[in-house]
Amino acid sequence: MKKLLLSVLVLTALVSCKDDENTNNQDVNYSKLPQEFPFSKLATVNGVDVINGGFGSGAAAHPTNKGEFYVITDRGANTDYLNGKKFLAPNFTPTIMHFKINAEGKIEVIKYIKLKNPSGQPITGLPNPAGMGSTGETAYDASGNTLGTDNYGLDSESIVAASDGTFWVSDEYGPHIVHYSAEGVELERISPIGVNTGGRKLPAVFAKRRANRGMEGLCITPDGRTLVGTIQSMMYVPSKALATNTTLTRIVTFDIQTGQTKQFLYKQDGGASDSVCDITAISSTEFLVIERDGNFGSQGGIKKVYRINITGATDVNGTDLNAVDGMKVNNKALEQNTWDEIANAGIKPVSKKLAVDLVAKLGYEHDKFEGIVYLGNNKLAVFNDDDFGVVDDGNGNPKAKILPKTGKVDKGTMYVVDIQ
């Protein structure tokens, strides 16, 4: 098993991401976009249709085939209920969709890949148990009955497609970074807690992520060596009561060959309720990242992409990666310091500048702008999470998720936009 895992990791290290010389968008007809993904009905709950959607929580280009992409769902359709979530289709398996833009410029599904545990059995999106990445949430079915947990469950949010056919997926539970085979079978799980199947782990401070605010974005550098992940928003370091810097979140890098990690600070425009979502590589030091709020674009929502650079940013890993409060400044966790205090300590966050405002550029109306793929030549593919076509009605039950501008049910849609 160790030899197999090593060979897989070596092959993965050969993956090549796209940079400014990328020609993935050439010879591909994007003129028919934007376009919705094809959907079927997953379930009907209280008379409300749950679509078999959710694709767009994260996205990646096929490493070699022009015009082919992968998009991934999250844990499945859910609504808020008591101290957790109602799972409207509890047996739903987080799934990767492989599709292409065909000669007519339309979306054509190639195949679906369901994620599986190391034994090859389909996983669910149910929460992990205590000690395995639990967020403290309780899972319920649509009727309010308590469900169990899943040791291998995943709230998948982003995806990297490697040149050897395998995938790296990040999630919001552990948070975990999980390596899957081409068939979706788990090969290795990397986290800040003791569930690391390959002996490698993320810094312990990432266990302080908030529920539903874990590792929202993941990409790989063009040299194929390093995974780069984004935490959705501020973490509760050292605790919910004491974390006061609501615009501070973190980026983590993971060297695939050595397992070495680094951390960088990211300053959000918004506060703790806003989100840093997907990330895509331009070069080994430059990336594009999503910042968004939770509103629809047609109702004043913020849906922006920033170009960031980690050159010159300070690695805040600290000397003890097992320290659950991470590096300290002024004898306080970083999240307890103001940005002025952090600057006075000589710590620099990543630099950032606006690449595109989707609402201003496209009149973008979706709320959950969550997936991006850099196509090269200043073109960007963007994707939304449609929440399986349902939202919470305020009482823990589903209602149709309606776009306020068009009156249509929200569905996963692919756009291509020019950026600065």
Image (cartoon, rainbow, N blue to C red):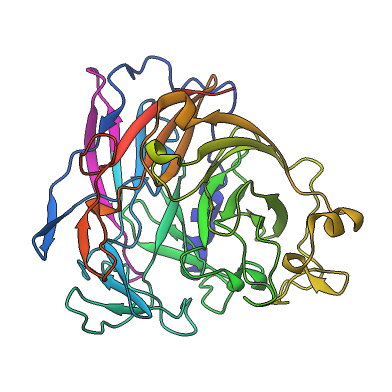
Q: Which residues are magenta?
A: 99-120
Query: Is residue 100 inside the magenta stretch?
Result: yes
Q: Position of residue 131 (x, y in %)?
A: 50, 84
Image quadrant assignment for residue 359: top left
Q: Is residue 193 left or right of residue 314?
A: left
The percent coordinates of residue 399 (x first, y second) are 20, 58
Q: Residue at x 47, y 31 (%)?
A: 358
Q: Nearer the viewer, residue 369 or 301?
A: 301
Q: Residue at image x 77%, y 40%?
A: 311
Relative side of 75 to 315, left or right: left
Residue 46 relative to residue 419: left or right = left
Indicate the position of residue 239 as horizontal and vertical percent values: 65, 77
> Residue 16, can we see it?
no
Residue drawn at x 82%, y 49% is: 348
Q: Is residue 244 above or below residue 106?
A: below
Which is nearer the eye, 189 or 106? 106
Q: Is residue 9 visible?
A: yes
When asked about the image quadrant of residue 219, the answer is: top right
Residue at 30 percent across and 36 percent down: it is 413
Of residue 91 and residue 307, the one placed in the foreground of this image is 307
273 is within the stretch colored magenta? no
